[in-house]
Amino acid sequence: MLSIDKQGDTFLYRQVIDLIAENIDSGTLRPGDRLPSLRKMSKTAGVSIPTVRQAYVELERQRRVESRPQSGFYVRHRAGNDLVRPTRTKALKPVPLSGRSLMERVYDGVNDPDLVPLGIANPCMARPAAKTLHRSMKRVMARAEERSLGYASTLGEPTLRRQIAWHYLDTIGVQVEPERICITNGGQEALLLALRAVASAGDVIAVETPTYHGLLELIDSLGMLAVEVETCPEEGVTLADLVRTLDEHPVKACMFSTTLGNPLGVTMPDDDRRRLVRILEERDIPLIEDDVYGDLRFDGSRPVPAQFLGRKLRALTCGSFSKTAAPGYRIGWIVANQDIDEIARLKRAFSCSSGFLQQLTLADFMASGDYQRHLKALRPVLRRNAERMAALVAEHFPAETRTSRPLGGSVLWLELDRQVSAETLFDDAIEAGISIAPGHIFSPCDCYKNFIRLSFGHPWDERTDEAIRWLGQRVSQLVASQANGRHPKKGRP
Amino acid sequence: MLSIDKQGDTFLYRQVIDLIAENIDSGTLRPGDRLPSLRKMSKTAGVSIPTVRQAYVELERQRRVESRPQSGFYVRHRAGNDLVRPTRTKALKPVPLSGRSLMERVYDGVNDPDLVPLGIANPCMARPAAKTLHRSMKRVMARAEERSLGYASTLGEPTLRRQIAWHYLDTIGVQVEPERICITNGGQEALLLALRAVASAGDVIAVETPTYHGLLELIDSLGMLAVEVETCPEEGVTLADLVRTLDEHPVKACMFSTTLGNPLGVTMPDDDRRRLVRILEERDIPLIEDDVYGDLRFDGSRPVPAQFLGRKLRALTCGSFSKTAAPGYRIGWIVANQDIDEIARLKRAFSCSSGFLQQLTLADFMASGDYQRHLKALRPVLRRNAERMAALVAEHFPAETRTSRPLGGSVLWLELDRQVSAETLFDDAIEAGISIAPGHIFSPCDCYKNFIRLSFGHPWDERTDEAIRWLGQRVSQLVASQANGRHPKKGRP
């Protein structure tokens, strides 16, 4: 397979890329195959190791291959079609929230053991850390028997804040002062406090499209308005569109998820993060960063939140243990560089403080090393679930179905035939004992009526296989009935 | 001591009252003495048992005697002077919150083991139920090992909501549908959700004066305004003043604590509750009822929340386990008769749901009977602490100090000489290792600058005795220094 031209005009690493790509396209390298190691490829192709690495990294960015920690680079599974970059079909205006009742019905299924839980993003439940967490909790109960019943301080238990600060240092090399961390009732309250700290009723907030439905409900509940910014399935927020939006609307704050955004699962590249920071710094607009999935990239890599890439940026980065360890503990946090005093005031006014026993437990869980071990064990389970779900979707859904390519987290985003109503599918699925999230709830506009989000964050069993098969067949039926029914204009334009 | 005139113009029960009162005034009956039993008094005085009961109840209302469950009526301790009904010195206007920084400093001491904790109202820590709660929690961890890590539903765990409904039925004979209960992150989030459900930024909210500081912070944080309604230390909200306030201001909602209001410790009599309900029903103004102390009357009696006294009243009653069982669990609730759907929507938007393990634990704690047993054991401890604190204040504080007469809960409200600054005392006390709550934080106006609130909700020890002694001496010094200093107009008008 060797055809490197050292005298040619093309950069050497580009030639390595083309070489690998040709072999993938021809089927010589198949999905799941391991690429030659850097050293071996360097020797074979007669180029330096950094050149090979540059090529592999670019191939990963192109989503042709993926890296796995301590293992190497692998050809990606390509189940079905990629999502395409959205084209803007109308001017984006600040819009209040619709689809409220549908959101309620999605949440109704949260705790229903009779439903196959494909509706709620719940990564850590794919491999619950019950034993180790309970062990930590029992230690805390023994150690602080009466004290653990009492109030935590407003900003939260110092030992937990120190552990979180250490985790940032350990994973991304960033020094965060524990005094700038406020513990919250899960990531959702973190978003509430952050939003209220920088904006008031009537203000316009820029969000991704599609975006996390809880964000939209929050903006609406505070009497604010959302304006959507184009988001590309490969690179996140489209910065050119962000600039246009900031020019056209009096945006008070941006609320973006820069790592494994929900539902697209997209991570903004580092260069784009830096450009994002510069754009917001120039206009003095605060960034609320929803970073609750940061620790859940399959390959264990941890992108640096935008907050830590700028010196002047006013930023509030929201984290949580709900996605990584224990949703029911309701423990999240905010790292705020300029607004920590206001955050403390709001925290006290809105809920006094967060659960003390849970804070002490998570501090013990982190200090013991159990948290890191748990994450290390959880990621490959999520990766396997993701691959299995993608393969089943490719097998059972109509061929024209497009899907996201999550590199972490626990959700797959599907674009169905445009004639299919996700709400109808949702209704049918609930009747069949399956919970899904219809696209409607991820935007204040009506642009995702034929999208659904499926979660693979739960222990996989035969019911899951069966549910995906059922959904695929049902979508095919809906497409067929549309083709034969009143709306014969089936198919994509 | 017998002098009942059966032929006279005075009602028989009035004569019994006068008889007892004379004997108390003369010192024949001393504080702590038990009154004759109903039967014995009936026999001795030659009047019916209901007549004696009527007299004793009226004496209790007059705060000359107090009833103790399964024991009888006792002459009350009278340490120092009663608070007097406030006279309105200026028009009450909607005012934003001041004294914010002082509030922060009070909260800073919450978790400082080096401070004698007289600053925070924390009744259940007077006798923590650690052993029984931990037992319940371990049962839950064993029974629902992995499930207990997951999300609770938005409105909360059904078994806990059923237990709370049962508790209402059991204690006040009122049937509450569990579907109208939403579990919250403590009483504070209950107040947040209730307030946001009925009012928006810019709205005017009527509150008692003095009132719970957390309410004022909440109103301020939501961009609303507070208007104070005169509150009498014996009967709570002055209804005539409430009517005047509603006439003069566009009040959007009332936020009152009808049972053991904080800091006055006053409980609104049932007749007044009914009148309050009628006033609000006529004007279609919702009532947010802060009822977190309802279970903590020393005598175990449980007044009926106003919500259950009216048919049309739009009411949101907020309860909590923070004052009765475990502040650190952050579990409270709202009973909403008309707004439960909006409450659920806000709960989801603001914090998704509340801690699941804690909810399951409290449901087990209640179902096992441990909660009722705990309350029964806690109340006499609080009563003893209250009496001890009142006696120490009478002994060590200047003679003109006026105090509340709490019949439950965990706080004593003190009016000091008007020249004494509670803020100065607060500063001095912190330096001396004592945390207190200065009057400033209980009102948006500056009318309680010479008031302090002392908490007796903690295990009593020598440090507590010493702290009260120290505070009394310090107040005496402050009075003396004012008398000799630049402000010689010492003393009360």
Image: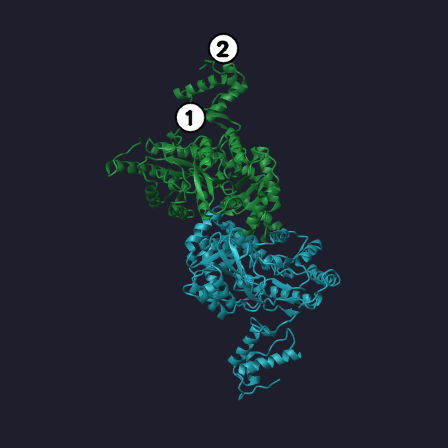
Chain colours: A green, B cyan
Which numbered tag is attached to residue A31?
1
Residue A50 drawn at (x, y percent): 54, 20
**For the residue marked with disc 1, what is the amino acid?**
Pro
Q: Residue furthest bottom?
A: B7
Tell me the chain of label 2.
Answer: A
Please tell me whether residue A354 is drawn above or below residue B338 in the rendered image.
above
Please tell me whether residue A484 is drawn above or below residue A154 in the rendered image.
above
Q: Do dots 1 and 2 share one subunit? A: yes
Could you tell which of marks 1 and 2 lies nearer the N-terminus?
Answer: 2
Whether residue A118 appears in this view of the structure is: no
Which numbered tag is attached to residue A7?
2
Q: Which residue is drawn at 47% across and 31% down?
A: A239
Task: Using the image as rendered, state which of residue A486 and residue A474 is in the foreground.
Answer: A486
Say what secondary structure mark 1 lies in. loop
Say what secondary structure mark 2 lies in. loop
Residue A90 drawn at (x, y percent): 37, 35
Please tell me whether residue B194 is drawn above or below residue A62 in the rendered image.
below
Query: In this rendering, would B399 be left or right of B306?
Result: right
- Mark 1–mark 2 CB contact (< 8 Å): no
Instruction: Calculate the distance from the C-alpha at mark 1 to the C-alpha at mark 2.
Output: 32 Å
